[in-house]
Image (cartoon, helix red, strand yellow):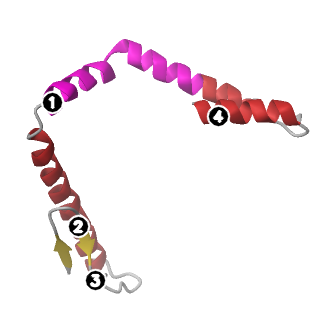
Amino acid sequence: MAEVTQAACIVTEVPEVQQGDTSNRRSLSETVLTCFQHTQTACDSCLNKLPFFKPMRKRMRSVAESAAFDAVIIGIILLNTIVLALYHYGIERTFEKVLDLCNMVR
């Protein structure tokens, strides 16, 4: 049904699914799950061989778990909400360009 390679998973055949038939849906979802698991395992084994990967991963994890990172992400979300709330009907062209620029920066 599916061919699994080192680089990626390629589904070569997708079974036809009749309405109300759940057996093929389950097999396709199991195939996709197996594909993701294989790809993740292959990528992890390749990345773990790099000498800089584990220390970098630890640093990134500590940054992502910090309170400052949470505050920055919440701040960005609030700024994005404000920028999107400023769009309105009849907006001036220059103000719209400024808002578009703000949306591109975030």
Q: What secondary structure is found at the residue carrying circle 1? A: loop
Mark 4 or 1: in front is 1
* Amino acid type shown at disc 4: Asn
Q: CA distance from mark 1 to mark 3?
A: 39 Å
* Amino acid type shown at disc 1: Phe
Reply yes or no: does residue 59 show up in magenta: yes
Nearer to us in this view, 38 or 95: 95
Nearer to us in this view, 103 or 25: 103
Q: Name the residue beneath numbered marker 4.
A: 103
Is residue 24 left or right of 55 when viewed as pictured? right
Reply yes or no: does residue 99 show up in magenta: no
Q: Name the residue beneath numbered marker 3.
A: 13
Mark 3 burial class by Cα count in 10 Å: few <14, some 14-19, many 20+: few
Q: CA distance from mark 4 to mark 1?
A: 34 Å
Mark 2 burial class by Cα count in 10 Å: few <14, some 14-19, many 20+: some
Q: Where does the N terminus fall, quadrant-wise? A: bottom left
Rendered location of residue 72, percent (x, y): 47, 18
Q: What secondary structure is found at the residue carrying circle 2? A: strand
Q: What secondary structure is found at the residue carrying circle 3? A: loop
Rendered location of residue 45, percent (x, y): 9, 47
Up/down of 80 relative to 4, above or below: above
* Amino acid type shown at disc 2: Cys
Label 4 or label 2, whichever comes before in sequence order: 2
Mark 3 or 4: in front is 4
Mark 1 burial class by Cα count in 10 Å: few <14, some 14-19, many 20+: few
Up/down of 70 relative to 53, above or below: above
Q: CA distance from mark 2 to mark 1?
A: 27 Å
Label 3 or label 4, whichever comes before in sequence order: 3
Q: Name the residue beneath numbered marker 2.
A: 9
* Amino acid type shown at disc 3: Glu
